[in-house]
Image (tube, helix red, strand yellow):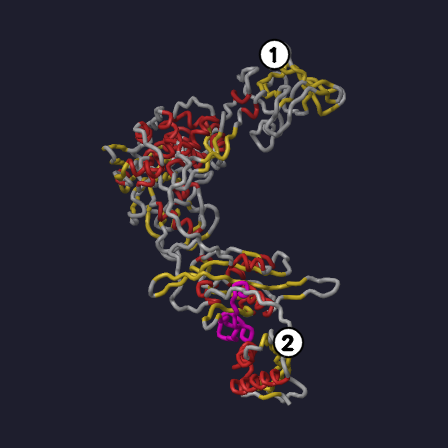
């Protein structure tokens, strides 16, 4: 928010410099992003009068001017403009002046003629983006005076970042109130103004159905308005305040809003039909906003409507059909107090931010509802004429946020801040509108109605802190009880060390995405006021977020994606909300680029399986991957559950092709996740000396039914059986071959198992090898009913 310094000085007699005011604002808790100095930017530019004009002897488009700037002798200036003549008064940048566009004026020669300055256009003065020639000043402009002073350019403009809790300071009066209280200066009252009522102008018919969301509403009809552009002084002020002039009526309402903090709206009275009603919208009701968007409203949205349609989304934006245009003659002014929470909910639903909504959702000053109406009426009739009707009033502003009291202790605030509270600080807060009464250690506070953000003792601690100054609070850490340091969680770090990039996605996803990987079982945690439909439920799967990240990267010509995320999943249970800490991986696309020695290779199931196994190995854990075709969202035949001991700890597999396509991904995608909360402590690595005696490696090839291998066995089950039967001498076992085809009966599959035996204390004999082989053959026959391939 931008505030011209002149506006502040109209409300409080400030004598400090802009730099000092900026420091005061920061101390009072208002972030100052910058201070613009428009007048300083044209320092050295003076009012000059052309005393003679002659053509340049060597250039058809240049003129030789003699310009009087109030010095002993006129200046010789070479000028390329053509819209000036003798006697005109123009801005003249003297030698040494630096203009807003960065140009520094120096004495020089142009086509052989000396030029001792520069005649300026509006563009060079920073007053416009483009101009057709020099800026011709009024005839009464005093020669030699600084142009910035004559044009009443702002001495300074403060660019403020108002914190969300200080809605009362989103206007000039709120900031002036804080500065006046801090400097012990009087705050100028708002000049009372009452428009002359014409009995021939009827008062608008208004009713309020949604009284909770709209406790006060005022409307007034003004007829015979001759709409024109707002005056130059108002447009200049609005531009300095960061707003674009629109038309006379809108500019007046914006000016009052920036000055007093009360947003208002004007309707074209001739476009309204019947009574105005402030009510809740019907589900699916149509609304075409001023910005051109066409909405289908939800039941409960607060709207302003006439007998035919919705004419405004209350506190946010008016309708296109009822808005003021160049042809408007009769208007209805609206000034109201809308419940902040309702405006905020509706604004988030439709992502429709406006200057009005930013103020209404933070809470406006109830006293300004009527004051703003009177001020706007007076300015409109003074500028554009018209006759005024009575104000229709619904509700009462006197009871809004009024009479709130709080009790706290002085010692409690002092303990929180670490400083004593001198009683003179109470006087500052009283000037800010608070009612402060001390009784020894007790503090009784009456909260002003415009301070919607103050309700608990901690809020008063902040008020005292900003008046005293945050710099005065000692930099001493509070005493804390000694606790054992938490063991660092390196889950995501180890995943990153394995070649994955860490990502962080939202904990909110769409219900549609949730259903891709989680069945509808009534356990979703739904947001009551989601930012959008795409963020309506708390996630129960991390895969949807990872797929969105993969889509984003693949669409930007990334050949492959390997990402991981550590986060939480959320679920409703009979005992309440449940959260699980998980680590999730995603692999898709190239993992090896084209090289001179090999071609590019894309990720497959076993790449991700290997990454998960390596991650588990760092924790001293071994995972068993058991085929499971029932995992929702994963492709049958390429999905498995991950067991750690007897506990199911995670899942892994290839994303179903249709689901990947729903994310606009047309290549295979592999995902996995591990529930970190169910992992037990792994075995600590121990050093074992290298064996001095050689090992023995043996191969066994079994013949088994293919259906049985797929259904009951699988590589993991076979390896576990071999390891269990091999005894203490068995060091390693793996499936090294899987074959079907020529030489193997139809419906059968040949499975090759390779195992290694070793004893660190002796050389193994043939008998040792045969005994282990016999035990393994027997175990395979017992578990799977298979025999050696002949």
Camera sees residue 511? no
Q: Are marks 1 and 2 in contact (CB under 8 Å)?
A: no
Residue 288: % across, % down:
44, 50
Provide the residue span drawn in magenta: 616-643
Q: Which mark is residue 71?
A: 1
Residue 495: % across, % down:
55, 60
Q: Residue at x 29, y 41 (%)?
A: 401
Between the C-alphas of marks 1 and 2, the distance is 107 Å
Q: Is residue 307 magenta?
A: no
Does residue 425 lie above or below 637 as drawn?
above
Tell which of 132 and 317 is nearer to you: 317
Camera sees residue 521? yes
Tell which of 139 and 91 is nearer to you: 91
Count of numbered circles in the view: 2
Q: Residue at x 32, y 36 (%)?
A: 414
Residue 676: % across, % down:
47, 63
Q: Secondary structure at mark 1?
A: loop
Q: Earlier in the sequence, mark 1 or mark 2?
A: 1
Q: Which mark is residue 695?
A: 2
Q: Which mark is residue 599?
A: none
For residue 167, what is the image quadrant?
top left
Q: Which quadrant is the C terminus positioned in?
A: bottom right
Does residue 635 lie above or below 376 as drawn?
below
Q: Nearer the viewer, mark 1 or mark 2?
A: 2
Residue at the top extreme, as displayed: 72
Tell which of 642 and 568 is nearer to you: 642
For residue 203, what is the image quadrant?
top left
């Amino acid at each position: 928010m931008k505030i011209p310094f002149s506006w502040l000085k109209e409300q409080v007699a400030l004598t400090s410099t802009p730099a000092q005011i900026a420091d005061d604002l920061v101390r009072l808790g208002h972030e100052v992003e910058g201070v613009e100095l428009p007048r300083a930017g044209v320092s050295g530019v003076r009012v000059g009068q052309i005393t003679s004009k002659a053509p340049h002897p060597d250039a058809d488009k240049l003129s030789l001017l003699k310009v009087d700037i109030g010095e002993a002798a006129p200046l010789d200036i070479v000028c390329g403009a053509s819209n000036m003549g003798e006697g005109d008064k123009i801005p003249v940048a003297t030698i040494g002046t630096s203009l807003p566009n960065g140009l520094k004026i120096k004495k020089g020669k142009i086509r052989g003629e000396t030029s001792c300055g520069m005649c300026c256009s509006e563009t060079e003065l920073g007053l416009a983006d483009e101009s057709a020639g020099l800026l011709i000043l009024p005839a009464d402009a005093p020669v030699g005076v600084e142009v910035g002073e004559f044009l009443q350019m702002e001495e300074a403009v403060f660019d403020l970042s108002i914190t969300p809790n200080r809605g009362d300071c989103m206007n000039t009066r709120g900031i002036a109130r804080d500065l006046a209280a801090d400097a012990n200066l009087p705050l100028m009252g708002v000049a009372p103004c009452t428009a002359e009522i014409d009995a021939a102008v009827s008062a608008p018919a208004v009713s309020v159905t949604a009284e909770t969301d709209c406790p006060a509403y005022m409307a007034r009809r003004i007829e015979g308005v001759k709409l024109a552009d707002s005056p130059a002084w108002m447009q200049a002020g609005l531009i300095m305040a960061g707003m674009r002039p629109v038309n006379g009526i809108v500019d007046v309402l914006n000016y009052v809003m920036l000055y007093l903090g009360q947003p208002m709206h004007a309707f074209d009275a001739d476009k309204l039909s019947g009574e105005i009603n402030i009510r809740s919208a019907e589900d699916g009701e149509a609304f075409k906003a001023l910005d051109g968007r066409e909405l289908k409203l939800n039941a409960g949205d607060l709207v302003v409507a006439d007998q035919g349609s919705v004419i405004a989304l209350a506190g946010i934006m008016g309708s296109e059909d009822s808005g003021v245009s160049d042809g408007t003659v009769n208007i209805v002014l609206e000034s109201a107090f809308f419940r902040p929470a309702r405006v905020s909910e509706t604004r988030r639903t439709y992502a429709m931010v406006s200057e009005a909504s930013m103020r209404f959702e933070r809470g406006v000053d109830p006293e300004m509802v009527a004051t703003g109406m009177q001020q706007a009426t007076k300015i409109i009739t003074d500028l554009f004429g018209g006759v005024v009707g009575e104000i229709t009033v619904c509700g009462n502003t006197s009871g809004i946020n009024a009479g709130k009291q709080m009790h706290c202790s002085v010692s409690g605030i002092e303990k929180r801040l670490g400083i004593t509270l001198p009683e003179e600080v109470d006087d500052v807060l009283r000037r800010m509108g608070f009612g402060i009464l001390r009784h020894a250690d007790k503090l009784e506070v009456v909260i002003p109605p415009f301070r919607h953000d103050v309700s608990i003792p901690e809020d008063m601690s902040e008020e005292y802190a900003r008046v005293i100054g945050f710099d005065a609070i000692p930099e001493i850490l509070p005493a804390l009880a000694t606790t054992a340091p938490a063991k660092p969680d390196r889950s995501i770090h180890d995943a990153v060390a394995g070649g994955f990039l860490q990502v962080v996605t939202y904990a909110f996803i769409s219900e549609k995405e949730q259903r891709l990987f989680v069945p509808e079982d009534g356990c979703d945690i739904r947001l009551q006021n989601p930012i959008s439909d795409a963020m309506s439920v708390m996630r129960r799967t991390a895969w949807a977020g990872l797929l969105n990240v993969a889509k984003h990267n693949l669409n930007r010509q990334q050949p492959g994606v390997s990402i991981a995320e550590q986060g939480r999943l959320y679920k409703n249970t009979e005992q309440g909300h449940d959260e699980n800490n998980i680590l999730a991986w995603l692999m898709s696309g190239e993992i090896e680029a084209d090289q001179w020695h090999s071609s590019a290779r894309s990720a497959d199931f076993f790449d991700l399986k290997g990454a998960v196994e390596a991650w588990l190995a760092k924790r001293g854990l071994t995972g068993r991957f058991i085929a499971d075709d029932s995992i929702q969202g994963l492709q049958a035949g390429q999905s498995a559950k991950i067991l750690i001991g007897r506990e199911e700890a995670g899942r892994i597999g290839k994303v179903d092709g249709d689901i990947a396509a729903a994310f606009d991904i047309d290549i295979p995608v592999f995902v996995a996740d591990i529930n970190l909360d169910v992992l037990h402590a792994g075995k600590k690595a121990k050093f074992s000396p290298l064996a001095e005696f050689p090992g023995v490696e043996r191969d066994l090839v079994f013949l088994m039914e293919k259906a049985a291998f797929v259904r009951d066995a699988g590589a993991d089950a076979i390896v576990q059986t071999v390891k269990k039967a091999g005894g203490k001498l068995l060091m390693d076992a793996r499936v090294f071959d899987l074959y079907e085809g020529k030489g193997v009966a139809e419906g059968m599959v040949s499975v090759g198992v390779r195992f290694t035996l070793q004893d660190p204390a002796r050389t193994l004999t043939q008998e040792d090898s045969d005994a282990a082989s016999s035990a393994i053959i027997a175990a395979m026959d017992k578990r799977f009913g298979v025999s050696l391939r002949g």
